Amino acid sequence: MILTFTSGFGGVRLRKESPIEVRRASPSRPATNPTQGGRFGVAASHAGYKWWALSCTSLGMLLAATNSGTLIIALPDLERSLHASLLALVWVILAYLIAATVLVLTAGRLSDLFGRKRAYVAGFVVFALASLGAGFSSGVTVLILWRVLQGTASAFLFANAAALVTDAFPKRQLGLAMGANTMVAAIGLVLGPVLGGALVAISWHWVFWFNVPLALVGAAWGALILRELAKPDAVRGYDVLGTSAFLLGLTGLVLGVSRGGLSGWDDAVVIGGLAAAFVLLPAWVLIERRSRAPMLDLTVFKNRLFAAATAAAFINGLARFALMFLFVFYFQGAQGNSPIAAGIKLIPLALGMLLASPLAGIHADRHGSRALAAAGMLVSAVGLAGMTTLAVHTPYWQSGLWLLIVGVGSGMFNSPNTAAMMGTVPAHRRGIAAGARTLLQNTGAVLSIAFVLAIVTSAVPKATLFAVFSGLAKGLSAHKLAPFIGNMHVALWVLTATSLVGSVVCLLRPRHVSAPPARDALPRPSRASALGARDGAGNGRALPARAGARSQRAGAHSDEDRTPSPPLSGRIG
């Protein structure tokens, strides 16, 4: 029992306090203080901070997903307005993806060194500036340059979103949190195509300008809400040589593949690009193995769970990303729909993700992610195979059904796979781990578009291609559109096979190990806490011992720092 002096209108009096009360009132334990130094939001140690942090990362996911959908639906209008070639039009998408892919690890590295909050907020600000500039573009070349800057900004958003969530949430709720982020992204994918169709009806410039206020709101919200939880990485330095090799190698590969279907595989640029990729990408691996501060720390792949999950993320990007790109031209080109109608027709793809993602995250928290992620890839493969039955005059209910099935499969895969991947790395390496995840997933997305473009444009008459990709194919007969539809089916079969391979890769991760009951989440010296036990999602993340929890998680909160709460808790504050 401790005696303390308190003052009031009645004078000075003694009050008895227990040691627990004193400890809770201490500045070193700010968890009961809802604010921190009078700032908006809550303190980092507050039990409700995780939901505030999730609101910030969800806003970033909403921005990225909505921007993707609005731009893809506007591609035919951009081709007509800017008089762009088909290859230049595709590079409006690819330039953004390559910048985001190559720089995401550098962004993760900088975040680990200087702070995730600072990098995340800066990403929002730069994205707003790049979107403003893109809307004022006078030609497709200028637009591509602004898209590179947009991709650079998105690298800082992608590299930090998963790391911020993993820092803030206890492991038993990590799948739920990742599912919520994926669900928000699905909402963005639902809104994006419809919003893009409406904005194109005004002017294509607004496809970019609408991002500006949303990005500025995200920057302000992140600056107010987020707290730095992880300590800076002790190893300093940047891998300029490795980053350059990967940038040139990936650009050469994507340029060669995307141009090959249009200009022929004997084209000098195609041969040069593929040769550069053949030399530089293997050299990049050798550079990373010898670098003191590598762009990608290859030692993280010694963890079997992380290696299998990142490989599955790459294959998922390869199997699914080009799908929306392909169906925009199927709906607007082959079937002659307006941009708004095409956007509405794409909704089932995002709706399936919206429905499946949170349920998949909750299931993974309780039963593990291995079988669920593999099942998601199988479901996607069924939907992709079903799409090969589509023709020029196929009724919409069929294409809508297959899009819904692929969306459900994607939702089943994404949140459990991300939770498993991020839960297995230590706190001070989560920035680079999130960057590795985005690197491989975006590399798959870039190659997905490049390969699908090469397949679809192969042996199709130039006049038909121009009509399809500019949205002016309404007057063409089914016979003239047959080469495009046939190549679309070939591309879909390739994506189906890729998804099946991804399902097998998902099964290569370790089997699920059951988590202890919620009542055992409080600290207790045990062999499990010393040796490390796998979390409820089968993520392989060690349960820290009481004495070393804060140092192991680098200032982030572990389960023993929190009042136990049920897995479905969804309160903010």
Image: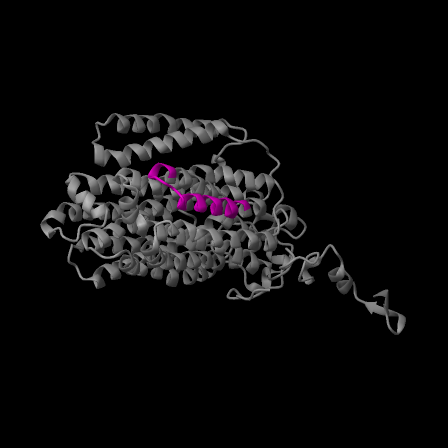
Left or right for 99, reference 495: right
Q: Look at the image and tell me whether residue 101 can be seen.
A: no
Q: Nearer the viewer, residue 197 or 297?
A: 197
As for residue 58 lying within the magenta part, the answer is: no
Asked which quadrant contains residue 520, the reply is bottom right
For the point 59% across and 60% down, the residue is 521
Image quadrant holding the C terminus, namely: bottom right
For the point 39% across and 61% down, the residue is 354
Residue 454 drawn above or below residue 496:
above
The magenta segment is: 122-142
Q: Position of residue 436 (x, y in %)?
A: 46, 41
Q: Look at the image and tell me whether residue 80 can be seen.
A: yes
Image quadrant holding the N terminus, namely: bottom right
Q: Position of residue 571 (x, y in %)?
A: 55, 66
Q: Nearer the viewer, residue 470 or 320?
A: 470
For the point 26% across and 56% down, the residue is 383
